[in-house]
């Protein structure tokens, strides 16, 4: 091998180049790696030259079209000395050949992450690399992590390497990538950290055999103990043990050999391969070889060992015995643990609900709730808090939609044919279907949405959104541009308060048990009490904020700037909606709450008169009424419910903008919206 | 599973192509006259062999010497319907009997010691390689680029003290043998025995090969590999097809005969450990599974849907367990499992199994949250562990729950 110690395989200061870096796995892993240790100097991918991979809080990773181009654009003193191959199986040979041809003088190690590389290609790579004196880890390795230097290649440690890999004195060498991670977590439970975590790869040919890794680990000054995870197949362990015996290997080893189960399966013709290599490739044979090397039977957690018993190490038969076996070895050698604080392994259920089944189980099977460690506890609490409604998994939606479909003949919305919607349903019902994913439960809700859309059409030519349409028309723009201008002139302040109102209402009502906002049990839900409680709370916060001289959070969608000054104020558009509901004998729990709230605010002295409930609040209440059951049954996301009131206002107001365009186009003079220079003033800085 | 072939496919589709001398053969349907004509050409002696995907046919008494067409037809009928080991033959066929002076064992395979292909030769062929003393076997590495040349081949034979007057002919056959191995994407190829006739002509008289399906040479070979009667279950068969349909994520299962625990396991390493621990502590897993490799939602959904379709009805415990994933997105895989479980429950009203889950990895909290919500909605008793509980402890606990 070219490397003399594990440190030579991967260390701080290495410069790494990554093949196929824009691939699904390579891209994501490289971003995490770069955050952990900014050692990737660039990558390459066919047809992607010139792109960059953004890494938050770090400089982005440049992408080149091939390895040669990467070298051309890199100064010689910054040439990569390590390469990571993520290419598809068919491209691995070509990429490795290019890396070796172009980088023979400076590439020290190639890590081949790709799975399903043919055994012939793997063997050819070995031959090429041997001749060029380049070390190859893989194929099918997960990568390597050097915890002491805080660097990694590949995906060892997943998206949070810090969690499992803390500085320490154990090197893990594993045929399984996943087990590198798992075993390092187990070791932490004994107060032991990791110096190196190495995934050797698990294909039939492992291009850096176990013996080479053990020799490198022996020379690694940080490593006291070596932990191995071994799978069946290959002569790697046989070769290693024969050599260890001869050279008098000095570091203790704890080994877990898996795969005995597979021996029970009839391997058919595959057996011949094992036979040709001899009898030393099976899990049973490897277990026997290690036990002979250790001069000990497998680890018994109840046994008292003497120091000399575990001089060479021991084999464990259950993975959760690893911390205890490692601890024994440390104690017997008089070595200190890497960490004083540690939590021993135990069954720690994060969530448990055995229901009636608990009564049928033996008492030792009925566990009590465990402790969820951070950051998972906070994350789960946040999810519990925030995920009223559906929890969705994001996916590639480029050519897909849940909302609409078309097979070239039939077009529809959420499974409803468009022609049937045209013939049997109204425009408003179809919009509700498109936005909420289903029809409204009550017929009158269609009327309510229609009323809210009508109310959104206009609030006169002076509103900012109407002005937007007029300005655009005055400049000679087309109708669609005028509508866009209208939409461009609405925002969180003008029209967007519906979102805040919806958020406000969800916070208050999310834990109250009712399915239908129009058919709720008034005996169990006291809206007056709710409103009063909220008003008092607001008053308390307002007073505290005033005392502290700071601003306070207002209640959204009350106290319209136009409709004020009376003892009791109304937004006439909202009043119309409210009165319509009264007229048909219905109560929207949210709108009713709003009305009681404005009165309660006056009653507790938080406002000097009864504020108007604004149209935005009514729109929010109407749509929350439609969506409530979908939300409670997790059929739609909370995000969607928050966005709909604004969309509803925008839809009405865009139509209003069209009206202003038609009017202004007919009667307005070109450029008439321009403010004469004489009326423009220079604002002085105060 | 890798693609495998036995002697009959070699005789029919490969031997001629690679100029490897083989005996004449006849496959059914064959008339009495054809057999009589062939036997007269062959010196009145032939053998009936089963076409079966296993070795040790001779030892199992599945090879019959025949001298006339009547014996041949009766032998073919009997042998084609008699299992060898636990495997049923696909057919039976008749091959020419080759008079022998020597029987030679050969195998070419990739060798984990040399990290290259290697050729193994012994003059004590015709028996299982295990029974040949190591001193009588020679294994040498073959340069993957240069291949096996006639000089190298003759060098091996000289070392084995193979009669020098026959070396040239056999060395050329060994070079053809190598050419076939390397140009068809094989992982392993065993010819045992080569029969060397009294005239020194080598004839390949039994054959088995395993191909590397990742090798484009095998894909380009377009061999017509027949379906052998397999003792695999419908479940394994369906999952094998599904696994073969995409490289995105693994979908390996293997029935192990249990009946209590339906294991959805992640990671090749972890899944073996978990299954071994389950069995060690008295659990009864239905199959061995490995579903890692960061499968997309659709892939994971269909994978578990197949598992549920075949086995959830009978399982008393659903175990979803894996180590701390490096790449596999837990929210995606758990959402797919939760949805498949919910959809299964919609179709089957009597879902009552317990669910034990243990996992770590990217987007874990979201994955656990999704799973918990679904299990609560389905009213299934459940225990969920995070990566701070070892998979082997969870497996031991799951086993105890089913005892």
Image (spheres, coloured by chain):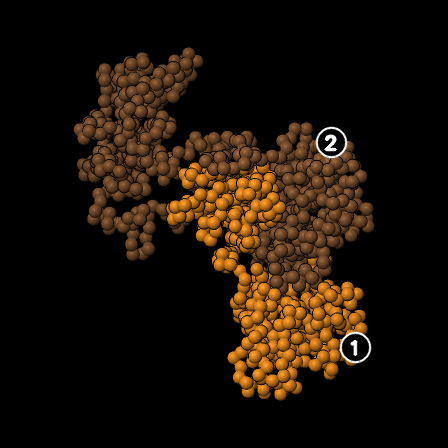
Chain colours: A brown, B orange
Task: Say left or right for A184 vs A610.
Answer: right
Residue A342 appears at what percent x and percent y? 64, 30
Q: Chain of mark 2?
A: A
Q: Chain of mark 1?
A: B
Q: Residue at x 57, y 83 (%)?
A: B70
Within the image, what quadrant is residue B138 found in? Answer: bottom right
Q: Which residue is mark 2?
A: A336
Residue A215 appears at what percent x and percent y? 76, 47
* Above or below, comparing residue B82 to residue B347 in the picture: below
Residue A653 appears at what percent x and percent y? 26, 35
Within the image, what quadrant is residue B205 found in? Answer: bottom right
Residue B165 appears at what percent x and percent y? 78, 80
Can see residue B134? yes
Q: Residue at x 74, y 45 (%)?
A: A297
Task: Say left or right for B349 vs A677.
Answer: right
Q: Is label 2 in a helix, a strand or a loop?
A: loop
Closer to us: A481 or A637: A637
Which numbered dot is residue B163? Answer: 1
- Quadrant including the C terminus of chain A: top left
Q: Residue at x 53, y 84 (%)?
A: B31
Determine crowd level at label 1: few under 14, some 14-19, many 20+ residues with C-alpha closer than 10 A: few
Which numbered dot is residue A324? Answer: none
């Amino acid at each position: 091998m070219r490397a003399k110690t594990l440190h030579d395989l991967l260390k701080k200061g290495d410069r790494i180049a990554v093949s196929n870096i824009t691939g699904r796995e390579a891209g994501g892993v490289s971003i995490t790696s770069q955050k952990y240790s900014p050692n990737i100097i660039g990558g390459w991918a066919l047809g992607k030259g010139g792109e960059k991979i953004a890494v938050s809080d770090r400089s982005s990773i440049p992408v080149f079209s091939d390895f040669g181009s990467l070298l051309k654009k890199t100064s010689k003193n910054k040439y990569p000395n390590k390469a990571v191959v993520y290419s598809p199986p068919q491209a691995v040979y070509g990429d490795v050949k290019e890396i070796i041809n172009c980088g023979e003088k400076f590439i020290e190690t190639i890590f081949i992450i790709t799975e399903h590389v043919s055994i012939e290609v793997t063997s050819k790579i070995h031959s090429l690399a041997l001749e060029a004196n380049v070390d190859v880890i893989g194929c099918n390795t997960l990568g390597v992590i050097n915890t002491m230097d805080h660097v990694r290649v590949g995906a060892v440690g997943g998206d949070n390497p810090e969690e499992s890999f803390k500085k320490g004195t154990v090197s893990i060498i594993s045929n399984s990538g996943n087990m590198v991670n798992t075993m390092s977590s187990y070791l932490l439970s004994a107060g032991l950290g990791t110096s190196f975590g190495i995934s050797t790869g698990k294909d039939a040919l492992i291009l850096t055999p176990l013996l080479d890794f053990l020799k490198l680990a022996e020379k690694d000054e940080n490593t006291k103990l070596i932990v191995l995870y071994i799978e069946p197949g290959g002569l790697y362990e046989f070769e290693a043990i024969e050599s260890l015996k001869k050279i008098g290997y000095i570091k203790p080893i704890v080994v877990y050999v898996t795969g005995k189960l597979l021996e029970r399966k009839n391997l058919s013709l595959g057996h011949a391969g094992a036979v040709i290599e001899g009898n030393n490739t099976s899990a049973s044979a490897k277990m026997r070889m290690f036990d002979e090397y250790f001069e000990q039977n497998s680890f018994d957690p109840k046994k008292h060992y003497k120091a000399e018993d575990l001089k060479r190490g021991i084999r464990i038969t259950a993975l959760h015995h690893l911390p205890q076996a490692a601890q024994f070895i440390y104690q017997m050698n008089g070595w200190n643990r890497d960490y004083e604080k540690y939590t021993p392994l135990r069954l720690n259920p994060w969530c448990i609900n055995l229901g009636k089944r608990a009564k049928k189980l033996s008492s030792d099977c009925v566990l009590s709730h465990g402790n969820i460690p951070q950051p998972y506890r906070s994350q789960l609490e946040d999810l519990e808090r925030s995920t009223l409604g559906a929890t969705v998994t994001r996916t590639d939606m480029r050519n897909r939609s849940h909302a609409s479909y078309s097979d070239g003949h039939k077009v529809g919305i959420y499974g409803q044919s468009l022609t049937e919607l045209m013939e049997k349903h109204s425009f408003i019902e179809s919009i509700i279907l498109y936005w909420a994913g289903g029809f409204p439960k009550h017929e009158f809700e269609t009327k309510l949405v229609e009323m809210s859309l009508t109310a959104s059409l206009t609030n006169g030519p002076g509103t900012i959104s109407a002005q937007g349409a007029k300005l655009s028309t005055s400049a000679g723009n087309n109708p669609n541009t005028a509508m866009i201008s209208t939409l461009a002139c609405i925002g969180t302040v003008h029209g967007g308060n519906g979102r805040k109102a919806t958020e406000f209402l969800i916070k208050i009502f999310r834990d109250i048990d009712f399915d239908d906002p129009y058919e709720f049990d008034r005996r169990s839900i006291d809206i007056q009490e709710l409103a009063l409680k909220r008003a008092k709370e607001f008053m308390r916060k307002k007073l505290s904020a005033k005392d502290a001289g700071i601003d306070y959070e207002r209640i959204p969608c009350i106290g319209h700037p136009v409709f004020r000054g009376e003892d009791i104020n109304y937004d006439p558009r909202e009043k119309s909606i409210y009165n319509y509901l009264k007229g048909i004998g219905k109560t929207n729990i949210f709108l009713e709450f709003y009305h009681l709230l404005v009165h309660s605010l006056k009653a507790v002295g938080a406002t000097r008169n009864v504020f108007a409930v604004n149209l935005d609040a009514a729109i929010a209440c109407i749509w929350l009424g439609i969506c409530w059951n979908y939300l409670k049954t997790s059929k739609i996301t909370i995000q969607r419910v928050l966005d709909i009131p604004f969309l509803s206002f925008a839809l009405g107001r865009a139509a209003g903008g069209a009206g202003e365009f038609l009017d202004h186009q007919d009667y307005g003079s070109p450029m008439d919206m321009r403010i004469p220079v004489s009326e423009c003033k220079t604002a002085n800085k105060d | 599973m890798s693609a495998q072939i036995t002697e009959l496919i070699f005789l029919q589709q490969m031997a001629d192509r690679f100029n490897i001398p083989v005996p004449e053969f006849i496959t059914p349907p064959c008339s009495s006259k054809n057999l009589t004509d062939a036997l007269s050409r062959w010196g009145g002696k032939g053998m009936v062999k089963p076409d079966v995907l296993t070795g040790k046919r001779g030892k199992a008494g599945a090879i019959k010497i025949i001298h006339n067409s009547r014996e041949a037809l009766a032998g073919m009928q009997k042998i084609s319907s008699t299992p060898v080991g636990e495997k049923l033959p696909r057919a039976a066929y008749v091959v020419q009997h080759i008079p022998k002076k020597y029987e030679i064992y050969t195998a070419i395979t990739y060798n984990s010691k040399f990290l290259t292909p290697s050729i193994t030769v012994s003059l004590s062929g015709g028996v299982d390689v295990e029974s040949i003393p190591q001193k009588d076997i020679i294994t040498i590495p073959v340069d993957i680029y240069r291949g096996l040349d006639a000089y190298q081949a003759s060098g091996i034979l000289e070392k084995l003290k193979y009669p020098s007057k026959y070396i040239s002919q056999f060395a050329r056959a060994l070079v053809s043998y190598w050419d076939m191995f390397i140009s068809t994407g094989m992982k392993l190829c065993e010819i045992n025995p080569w029969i060397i006739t009294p005239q020194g002509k080598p004839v390949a008289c039994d054959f088995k090969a395993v191909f590397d399906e990742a090798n484009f040479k095998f894909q380009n070979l377009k061999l017509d590999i027949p379906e052998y009667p397999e003792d695999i279950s419908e479940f394994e068969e369906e999952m094998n097809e599904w696994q073969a349909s995409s490289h995105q994520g693994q979908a390996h299962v293997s029935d192990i005969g249990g009946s209590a625990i339906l294991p959805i396991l992640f990671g090749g390493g972890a899944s073996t450990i978990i299954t071994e621990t389950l069995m060690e502590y008295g659990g009864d897993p239905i199959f061995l599974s490995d579903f890692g490799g960061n499968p997309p939602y659709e892939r994971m959904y269909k994978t578990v849907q197949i598992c549920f379709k075949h086995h959830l009805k009978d399982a008393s415990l659903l175990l979803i367990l894996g180590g701390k994933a490096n790449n596999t997105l837990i929210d995606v895989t758990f959402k797919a499992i939760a949805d498949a479980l919910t959809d299964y429950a919609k179709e089957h009203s009597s879902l009552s199994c317990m669910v034990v889950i243990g996992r770590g990895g990217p987007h874990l909290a979201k994955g656990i949250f999704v799973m918990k919500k679904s299990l609560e909605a389905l009213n299934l008793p459940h225990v969920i562990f995070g990566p701070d509980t070892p998979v082997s402890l969870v497996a031991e606990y799951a086993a105890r729950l089913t005892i």
